[in-house]
Amino acid sequence: MSEKHDVTGASTTGHVWDEDLADFTNQPPKWWMLGLAASGIFVVIYWLYYPSIPLPSSNTHFKGVGGWTAVKEMEADKGDVDAVRGKYELKLKNMTPAAILADNDLTEYVKRSGKVLFGDNCAGCHGTNGVGAKDKEGLIAPILNDDDWLYGGKIDDIHTTITGGRQGMMPAHKDSLSAQQIDDVAKYVKAMSDQGKDKADVDSAIAAGKKVFMESDCIACHGADGKGMQAMGSANLTDKVWRFDSSLEAVKYTITYGVNSGDPKARIAIMPNFKEAGKLSDSEIKKLAVYVYKFGGGQADAAVAPAQAAATAPATVSAK
Ligand code: HEC
Ligand code: HEC
């Protein structure tokens, strides 16, 4: 029941909202109608081109005339990524970790893939970013982002650690030392860490412990200076960094039962071997060595200047 609007004279539906506010019967603008038609056509083309309509017969769908699949698209993307990566991967295959470190561009690339590798293979024991992870017995594995190293913090040391694994060995002393001697020597070890080696040496209250330290087997591995030897991963006992725990009880426990000593109560400290076990490729191990080095604790190799390292790289890298 079309009517005319009082004021404008335009056709209305006859429905009046309020005084002169009425529903007009004007057509929508042409551009709007064209847009509507165009979007309808677009939908039909889209349906036909891409996989879309489910088919009733089986658990399938209309595949689309374009042959597009998500898998194909992913592979194309992956191809692009591989093309960029390939350049770097090829390069680092024949470089030593030291040479990679000397190349800023490559180091940046390696750090990025190292992060993923570390998360997948190492963080469970060493914590995200190497900050350490604990279970009820304390640190599962050494902290990697400090400059305290059992086996050395030079790039080649770190590379060797990851390649071959590490397993420090300290014998149990429950049979070779008396309970008193273990108590004494533990106090001396703690004092070397807490008050420093020089003060501990002149502290008469712990002289008995020093005597045990110097006269039993301790110095064979930890050295007369207590600083440890990286070749065997014997901890530095004079710094404030504890691999296990700093309490007197924990120190006595380590001395009593040892580390990886075969004693049923020994502390276990095994860094797995990632190369022989085939868990990581050579390139992946190199990436991880650089990544760990770059946590901040890596130590410069004074003997080899970066440029020299790069120059000797192909010669020193092994065939594999
Ligand atoms: C199952 C636990 C475990 C996993 C997984 C593990 N580690 Fe270790 N890692 C250890 C332990 C334990 C030690 C110390 C060994 C020792 O005390 O003799 C260690 C030592 C190290 C050291 C030497 C630290 C030092 O102070 O000299 C480096 C470097 C290292 N790990 C890197 C890695 C990297 C990189 C990965 C991953 C590819 C990794 N670890 C995976 C347990 C683990
Ligand atoms: C055969 C070598 C060897 C002998 C002998 C030895 N140690 Fe050790 N000791 C080690 C190694 C290796 C470690 C580090 C274990 C690890 O983290 O893998 C260690 C670790 C320790 C720790 C733990 C340090 C920390 O940071 O938590 C203490 C304490 C210690 N030794 C004291 C002694 C004392 C005291 C003696 C002598 C009674 C002794 N050790 C004899 C090799 C030895």
Image: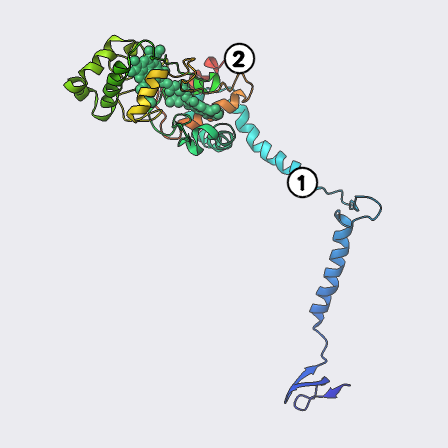
For image coordinates 52% across by 30% down, the residue present is: 120
Image quadrant in which the N terminus is located: bottom right
Q: Is residue 304 visible?
A: no
Nearest to the observer: residue 47 or residue 213: 213
Kind of residue indicated by mark 1? Glu
Identify the residue under disc 1.
73
**Nearer the N terminus, badge 2 or badge 1?**
1
Q: Is residue 148 left or right of residue 184?
A: right
Residue at the spot x=69%, y=82% of the render? 23
Residue 42 position within the rendered picture, expressed as x and y whole percent measured from the top left: 74, 57
Q: Quadrant of residue 301?
A: top left
| Identity, as a three-letter code, of the amino acid under mark 2 | Ala
Label 1 crowd bin: few (<14), some (14–19), many (20+), radius 10 Å: few
- Judged from the image, the secondary structure of the residue bearing numbered disc 1 is helix
Instruction: For the C terminus, give its image quadrant.
Output: top right
Q: Which label belongs to residue 319?
A: 2
Q: Position of residue 315 (x, y in %)?
A: 47, 13
